[in-house]
Amino acid sequence: MNILCTAAILCGIAGMTAACAEPPVKPIPDASRKDVAAISGDLQGVKISDTSKLGARGSDEGGRLGAAQGAATVASGGSLLALLMMPVGAAVGGAKGAAEAQSEAVVDETRANLRVALQEVDFTEMLRARLAASATPDAPRIIDVTTGSATAPLVGKDGAPIQQMIALEYRLNIYSEHLVNPKIGIYVNITAQVQSPDRKQMIHKATWSYCGERQDFVQMSANNAAGLRAQIDNAAAVLAEAIPYDLYVSREPRRLTIKGACMDFTNLPSGIGKQPGPARS
């Protein structure tokens, strides 16, 4: 049995494990990118700004959420003993949650600051402007990036035609761990459909997942949610470099290497992926 056959069998057995799962981002095949000199793109997306469930408001809610978290933590062991110990986990978690929960006023202000920041920050324009201005070495020239579906220009201002266009769609939201005093970060999922200029041929497709490093939700909301706003800005900077680099320059796929949900961008040439870096905790 040859090595390729053995690898195929192993992947079949493993199913959707990280080792054998198809990477969500792969470079465009050489045959489809070697003669591409100019590209354009259009961008649209959605932000989820609902923060009404973040954190526990006061000791009563802290007790309830803490109990749920404690029971779930014990049950995650998966054994019969773990299931039998769920009431103990709930009791311990409930007491801890009630003691550590923030006041209602603090949580209300925190949720409001985070919600307003998500609503005010124009991520679409942040990412659009950075993509339009990007000049990734060895990547095709980006003549322009517009907002809205099917709006990408087919020729540059100098009249030069594009060879490919990229339709980009994103979803941005807060992701978190823990219930009572959650640690939160920005999560952006963005898909690129590389198409022929007339949009009739789908050439390539890739999806990136950016995870900002999680921090305490009260800390993240401080100073008009400065930490959250900075993380959104960083997400735009990282993705604006990663998209053309991964599609047209890189020879390696970009996988979900961090907890099967997040990508590590530390190999980007500029080093921007190292600040603040993807969540590892």
Image (cartoon, helix red, strand yellow):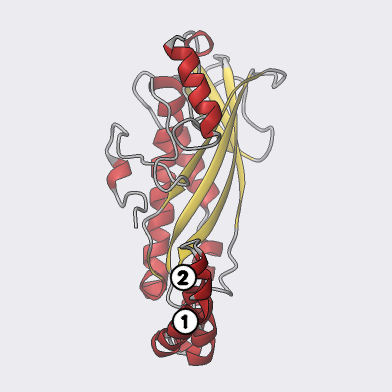
User: Residue 256 appears at what percent x and percent y?
Assistant: 44, 40
Given contact means CB atoms under 8 Å apart, are the residues at marks 1 and 2 in contact? yes
| Residue at (36% x, 56% y) in the render | 213
Residue placed furthest toward the right: 200
Whether residue 97 can be seen here: yes
Whether residue 112 can be seen here: no
Q: Nearer the viewer, residue 231 or 27?
A: 27
Q: Amino acid at mark 2?
A: Val
Q: Nearer the viewer, residue 272 or 42?
A: 272
Instruction: Write down the residue under mark 1.
Output: 88
Locate residue 238 relative to residue 72 in the image: left or right. Answer: left
Report the Cα–Cα distance between label 1 and label 2. Answer: 9 Å
How many C-alpha atoms fall within 10 Å of the one at disc 2: few (<14), some, or many (≥20)? many
Residue 83, above or below 41: below
| Residue at (28% x, 45% y) in the render | 274
Residue 16, above or below 98: above
Q: Nearer the viewer, residue 8 or 61?
A: 8
In terms of secondary structure, where does tag 2 sit? helix
User: Residue 208 appears at what percent x and percent y?
Assistant: 49, 39
User: Residue 240 appears at what percent x and percent y?
Assistant: 43, 38
Give me the disc on residue 74.
Answer: 2
| Residue at (43% x, 86% y) in the render | 102
Give me the disc on residue 270.
Answer: none
Locate residue 108 relative to residue 219 in the image: left or right. Answer: right
Give the position of the C terminus as an image quadrant. Answer: bottom left
Q: Tell me the quarter of the picture where residue 146 sits.
A: top right
Q: Amino acid at mark 1?
A: Val
In terms of secondary structure, where does tag 1 sit? helix
Q: Nearer the viewer, residue 32 or 182?
A: 182
Q: Earlier in the sequence, mark 1 or mark 2?
A: 2
User: Residue 169 appears at what percent x and percent y?
Assistant: 61, 40
